[in-house]
Image: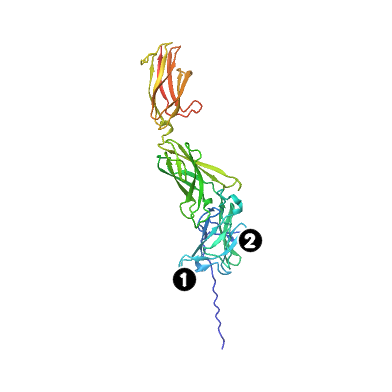
Amino acid sequence: MKKIIIISIVILCLVIPQNAFSTTQSGQITTSTGNSGSPIQLNKKTFSWTDRVYITIYAPDFNSDPNIIDEIGVTTDDKITVSTSGNSIPYRLAETGPNTGIFSGYVTLTGDPTLKGPTGVDGQGTNPTGIQSTCNPICGPTNGFLPSTRNDGVTVSFEYNRNTVITGSGLIRWNTGNVEWLQPSYPVNSQATLQITDPDMNLNPDAVDKFDTNVWSDSDSGGIKLAMTETGPSTGVFQGTVYFTTDLSSSGSRVHVTSGDTVTAEYTDTTLPLPYSPSDQQRITATTIAGTSIPPLEQVVSGNAKILDSEGKSLDKVNVNQQIQVVSDVTNQENKDQPFAYLVQIQDNNGITVSLSWITGAMTPKQTLNLGQSWLPNMPGAYTAQIFVWQSIANPNALSPPLSIHIQVS
């Protein structure tokens, strides 16, 4: 009697989205995270040197048991490796739930403390750890640590069949920080919020990081060291609260101000992207106003422009060789002394300037002055007098819109 032998062969395939791969000359298959159909996805295209890298691999055929949470990266048939330049660790990922076929985990980048040395990224000796996980035999899905540099990359490779490897990768770069006050002005004797955004200072994704920055005012150029606290683990956004006081000296988080002061915050960024070197640093500043903030062209109000004779009487017509005054009212809108330059320019009908004169001075808060400049016309014709109010002759920032008045000389 003949025996019939039945041989059952099970072929395991990885279901991969169409057009997810390109083939290299070596025959290996690679993929990019820029392709939305890629089976390997990272949560970002560019990471900071101490960022957390979230990894997702779509591998439905490795969902071996629909009733449990499966893992990949645990055998020679489904090897996963996570690498930065010169560093790599074997890794495993866990299924996001029973029967999903989607596997995930994360690796934490730990930077390189040698890049900044003893002074640290904050000038006070604070540095990233630069540690690498010791895997026995495989790390994951959430306990992996990899060192990284300022100009690096992170790559996840998944070898699911002999000589068949797919990869996903992202860049690692330093960033330029941003400094801003959350409002353009704050009342005196109130709190102000400073915000600094710099992912490079998120040195520990599991903790709230802190560092100090400089804040000073026009009234106290020495200022304070303000503690900046991360808004949450791994946000890379830091905030500090400053109290503007007119009565007390600067101390702690308190800055002495006078109404109208400009308050400046300065952040020294020591982790700058290329083409800067690791030893370079950049001071970044932001300003706010203590007290009412008035737009530049509204700091002074000028109006009521007119022509007067030598006795102060209004003129409807002007004669040749008659001394006149070009006058207007000027009011300081600020709650502080306001230096000014009052200029009167006379032009003829062809736009040629025939006279330019000015006076300078300073107005007290809310003061109104009646200002004027004299002119002696020596020829008949149609003229235009233009009145300008500037911060000074050397600093011609306009404090109010210019005025003009027509003068007919006969």
Q: Residues within 10 Å of mark 2 (few under 14, many from 20)?
A: few
The residue at the far front in this view is 248
Q: Which residue is mark 2?
A: 26
Between the C-alphas of marks 1 and 2, the distance is 37 Å
Mark 1 or 2, closer to the camera: 1
Residue 121 drawn at (x, y percent): 56, 50
- The answer to whether any part of residue 381 appears in the image is yes
Label 2: which secondary element: loop
Q: How is the image coloured?
A: rainbow
Q: Specify the amino acid type for callout 2.
A: Ser
Question: What residue is shown at x 61% (from left), y 47% (from top)?
Answer: 279
Of the pair 35 and 252, the residue shown nearer to us: 252
Label 1: which secondary element: loop
Picture layout, residue 318 above or below residue 214: above
Q: Specify the amino acid type for callout 1.
A: Ile
Picture layout, residue 300 above or below residue 376: below
Residue 142 drawn at (x, y percent): 51, 63
Ranked by sequence position, the earlier of labels 1 and 2 is 2
Q: Which residue is mark 1?
A: 68
Q: Quadrant of the C terminus?
A: top left
Q: Residues within 10 Å of mark 1 (few under 14, many from 20)?
A: few
Q: Quadrant of the N terminus?
A: bottom right
- The answer to whether any part of residue 38 appears in the image is no
Q: Contact (CB < 8 A) between labels 1 and 2?
A: no
Question: What residue is shown at x 43% (from left), y 32% (from top)?
Answer: 296
Give the quadrant of residue 182: top left
> Would you say 25 lies left or right of 100 here?
right
